Amino acid sequence: MSNVNHKKVNIVPLKELNLTDRFLFDEVMEDPETQQAALSIIFEREIPLLTRSETEKELRLSPGIRSVRMDVFAMDEEQNIYNTEMQNKRKSDLARRSRYYQALLDTSLLENGIPNYNLLNDTYFVMIMPFDLFGRKKYRYTFRSECQELPGLLLEDGAVRVFLNTRGEDKEGVSRELIDFLHYLENTTDEAAEQASGERIRKIHSRVRKVKSNEEIGVKYMQAWEERYYDKQEAREEGREEGARAKLREMVEKKLRKGQSPEQIADALEEEQEVIRDLLKEIQQDRGE
């Protein structure tokens, strides 16, 4: 492991993470019994899972199409599909992102040559957020396709999208257990688990404690953190380099319009002639010359 100064960049120790952290969420929900308990709380009905939960499941239709990496993917005994995502950052594209994820998920469910779309599994896309995406103070927002001309007439296409807000205020229509669970996600402590209603949250917390005390997972967390840290550093450096190159190109174009030769431009800008010639080729290509 590399010698990164963790104190300087304020890395949060694994034992202090809340379940709103994507790493901890994925590690905890990889356990099928824990995922089953969480889904049963969210949908307020027992959901016996058929298969082991998959974390960071990648879906790609073809090399030319953008892939997506789903946080926690599971199937129940009735072959309903559940994809659960932890989303920490508020972004303007989250609603459309859920549409894209669900579309890719649907496309992956039917084998080639099967024309019967009734064989498509029912799918439930769940996004958990520590903010209110819709601003209506609900803890849970459930979306199904509905006829605008006849309210209450559902399309019944088997696709459901659920957005959970850990900071909701309106308790109408949701269970005490779901509210406690959403609060627990942001405050994943022994005290919060003990005070929560229902045994399922305490069952989830038992898994959390095991994950946090596991040395191998601790090493994995540090490695994942360092990888993200260096990726960000590299991206910043690339951004600075691209910005500097764009500025240099702008100055080259100005001097080119004044009729200066590559040698004159290189001399004026104190750059290598080869660098200037490469930029001139790039400019010519962009102009179609």
Image: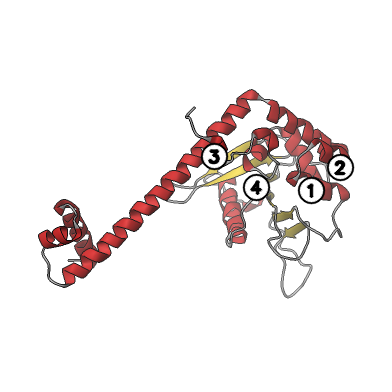
| Residue 157: x %, y % from top left | 68, 57
Q: Quadrant of the C terminus?
A: bottom left
Q: Mark 1 sits on what residue?
A: 183
Name the residue furthest front. 8
Q: Nearer the viewer, residue 102 or 252?
A: 252
- Observer able to see residue 154: yes
CA–CA distance in space, label 3 to label 1: 30 Å
Closer to the camera in the image, 83 or 191:
191
Q: Which amino acid is tagged 4?
A: Glu
Circle nearer the viewer, 4 or 2: 2
In space, the residues marked 2 and 3 are separated at their CA atoms by 36 Å
Q: Are marks 3 and 1 in contact (CB under 8 Å)?
A: no
Crowding at dot 2, Cα within 10 Å, few <14 / some 14-19 / many 20+, comes out as: some
Q: Earlier in the sequence, mark 3 or mark 4?
A: 3
Instruction: Look at mark 4 in the image and give the residue it sits on.
Output: 85
Question: Which badge, 2 or 3, is on the more N-terminal residue?
Answer: 3
What residue would you read off at disc 2?
Answer: 196
